[in-house]
Structure formats: structure tokens, C-alpha cells
Image: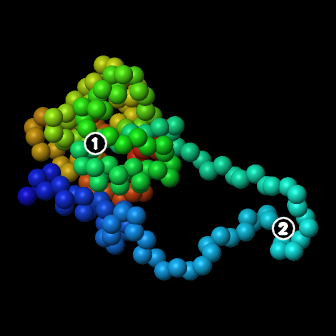
Amino acid sequence: MNAKQNPRSLQGAVLIEHFQGTPRPPGTDTAPARGPTTTPHPTAPPVGSTRGRGRVAPTPRRPRGPRSGRVIDDEPLVVKVIAEMLAPEHDVTRETSGEAALARIRAGEHFDAIVCDLMMPRVTGMQIYETLLEVAPEQARAILFLTGGAFTARARMFLDRVPGAAMEKPFEASALRARVRRLVG
């Protein structure tokens, strides 16, 4: 039995990596309480100093990734975890329906990066890619397909035709973020 025939095995693999090898439900924090975790800014005045009083130092802006990203997968839990993996660097829109994703693409919505499951029921990642080529070719260059393996001859031929556009499941969060960074330049 492969991951597509048993999606729970794929979800488990992605979730285990996401939670650093410790399977636990999303939103659960198992780290022991250690008190405040804030540290002073390196240029902050020493405690008790009057230097800088009355002024508020600007908060350094963290670098952002693309303006927007979309995650498309028919498994809601996988979409949630992948969106969380990308969220530190990207503004992520979640989609669990290939049909809904196609409707949004045809309506003119633009995303700088798209992470899409290759094999979904009803509308596949391949169909989403073909629609992008017609409607928004620049977005077709910014798509990364996630696959547990290309199980059909058509899927294998598609991946041969679109080289470098796929990432095998399971994967590490850092590897996914690196691939998406390369997509957006």
C-alpha cells in the first residue's frame, strides 16, 4: 500500500517532521514552562540607564518572502501543516479543493508561489498547471508539486515534461521553504 492509497501514513510523516519527530496534535505545546523568554535588544541601554528614555526604538522588520502563496491539497490536515511550515516567510492561502483553486485562478487571483498536490481527486495538480499555462503563464513557473510518487503513466510523463517542479513526500520543512524561496527568486 502506498501513501496515496493510505493518506494517513503521509499525513503522519509530514506531521511528525513538522513537530520535530514528536507526534502530537496541532496546537499542543509540550515544552516545559521556563519563565520569560525575552532577551534585551543588543543595543538596548543597560537596566537602570536613562539613555534612550522617551523614545521607542523601531522594531526591525523581518524579511518577508513572496507577497502571497497558495497551498492546494485535498487533505485538510496536510494543507494546514504545509501552510504552517511556510507561514514564517509567506502569506499563505489554503485550498482543499482543486475545483475551487481553478475557479480562483480563472477569476484572476495571483499568487507568487503555489504548492500543490499532484494527485488529487476530481481536479489534479496537472490540470491546475495546464489552466495556469493558459490563464496566467507566469504563475505556472512558480508552482511546486508535492507527490508521494507519480502513480500513473500520465503523472510520470507530466513530471518528465515539467522537470524540477516536484518534491517527494515526506519532506523536511526547511527543504520545502528552500524550494519555495527558489521559486520566487
Per the image, the residue denoted by label 2 is 45
Callout in the foreground (2, 1) = 1
Three-letter amino acid code at disc 1? Thr
Of the pair 164 and 23, the residue shown nearer to us: 23
Per the image, the residue denoted by label 1 is 96
**For the residue labelled by badge 2, is the local secondary structure a helix, a strand or a loop?**
loop
Q: Quadrant of residue 16?
A: bottom left
Of labels 2 and 1, earlier in sequence is 2
**For the residue labelled by badge 1, is the local secondary structure a helix, a strand or a loop?**
loop
Q: Are marks 2 and 1 in contact (CB under 8 Å)?
A: no
Judge from the rendering whether residue 141 lies leftward or rightward of residue 76; answer left or right: right
The residue located at (24%, 49%) in the rendering is: 75
Q: How many labels does the image show?
A: 2
Judge from the rendering whether residue 104 lies leftward or rightward of residue 111; answer left or right: left
Residue 182: image x %, image y %?
Answer: 45, 42
In which quadrant of the rendered image does the N terminus lie? bottom left
Residue 94: image x %, image y %?
Answer: 36, 43
Of the pair 122 and 173, the residue shown nearer to us: 122
Residue 157: image x %, image y %?
Answer: 16, 34
Three-letter amino acid code at disc 2? Pro
Of the pair 155 and 103, the residue shown nearer to us: 103
- Does the image show residue 158? no
The residue located at (31%, 57%) in the rendering is: 171
Report, in whole angstroms, how far the alpha carbon at label 2 lies from the one at label 1: 49 Å
